[in-house]
Image: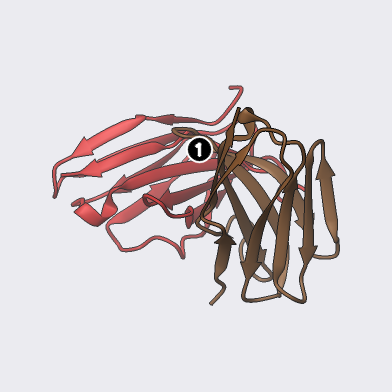
């Protein structure tokens, strides 16, 4: 597609519920990233994929967070047993050329997760 | 641990003014620094990327400078317009960090009044 598409745009979950957030990167983009942005804060890195390989998951806050990109395109971020502190906007970004130091990131509009 | 600070947190200016947004970082061992724009309810748009070996980058009315030794970057916006109203974020990528691991500041919320 023309941009990075994320769905749903908004998600309200009851505490303890599992959620799945989807990211459709730009077609052909090798690299895909997930960020978490709490209200009034800058985005914080969660995890990074190069094709289907998850090369860095150092930002995932707990083992309740899991991300996958099985075919190297669409990615899903799953949060199990959601808690109130998980409420945030989850941003996905993709990039075309990880070897080019001038690469730019294209971000999606994000999924706003509210845990009640 | 790298920390990125942006000052001011919010700024309101009349249309036509030139303005400067500030970004500071605590660890000078950065690979590059990027400035992003974020509109409400939208994702981030990359504005300028400065490699660690560069001093500045320009795009239209925007000019970003980088002083790695002092841990500072500025984003200069000339002749501001109401359409420039948004939150501006700076982010650094560290040497040795994965290419997606950007460390962001909290942003400066800019309002340009007609």
Q: Is residue A106 above or below residue B5?
A: above
Q: Would you say A49 lies left or right of A30 here?
A: left
Q: Position of residue B29 (x, y in %)?
A: 71, 75
Question: Which residue, given by chain and number where applicable, does mark 1 sit on?
Answer: A71
Q: Is residue B59 visible?
A: yes
Q: Is residue B15 above or below residue A59?
A: above
Quadrant in which the C terminus of chain A appears: top left
Q: Position of residue B102 (x, y in %)?
A: 59, 58
Q: Nearer the viewer, residue A97 or B90?
A: B90
Q: Nearer the viewer, residue B14 or B43?
A: B14
Chain in brown on the image: B
Density class for disc 1 (Cα within 10 Å; few <14, some 14-19, many ≥20) is few
Chain in red on the image: A
Q: Nearer the viewer, residue B59 or B78?
A: B78
Q: Would you say B45 lies left or right of A36 here?
A: right
Q: Is residue B9 above or below residue A70?
A: below
Q: Secondary structure at mark 1?
A: loop
Q: Position of residue B66 (x, y in %)?
A: 78, 62
């Amino acid at each position: 597609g023309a941009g990075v598409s994320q769905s749903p745009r908004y998600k309200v979950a009851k505490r303890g519920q599992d959620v799945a957030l989807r990211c459709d990167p730009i077609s052909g983009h090798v690299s895909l990233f997930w960020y978490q942005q709490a209200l009034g804060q800058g985005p914080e890195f969660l995890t990074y994929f190069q094709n289907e390989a998850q090369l860095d998951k150092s930002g995932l806050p707990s083992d309740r967070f899991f991300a996958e990109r099985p075919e190297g395109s669409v990615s899903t971020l799953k949060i199990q047993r959601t808690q109130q502190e998980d409420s945030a906007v989850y941003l996905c970004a993709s990039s075309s050329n990880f070897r080019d130091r001038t690469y730019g990131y294209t971000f999606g509009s994000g999924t706003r997760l509210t845990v009640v | 641990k790298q920390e990125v600070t942006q000052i001011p947190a919010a700024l309101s200016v009349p249309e036509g003014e030139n303005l400067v947004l500030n970004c500071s970082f605590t660890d000078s061992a950065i690979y590059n620094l990027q400035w992003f724009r974020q509109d409400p309810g939208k994702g981030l748009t990359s504005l300028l990327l400065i490699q660690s070996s560069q001093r500045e980058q320009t795009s239209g009315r925007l000019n970003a400078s980088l002083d790695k030794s002092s841990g500072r970057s500025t984003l200069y916006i000339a002749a501001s317009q109401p359409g420039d109203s948004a939150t501006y974020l700076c982010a650094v990528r560290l040497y040795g960090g994965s290419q997606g691991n950007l460390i962001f500041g909290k942003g400066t919320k800019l309002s340009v009044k007609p």
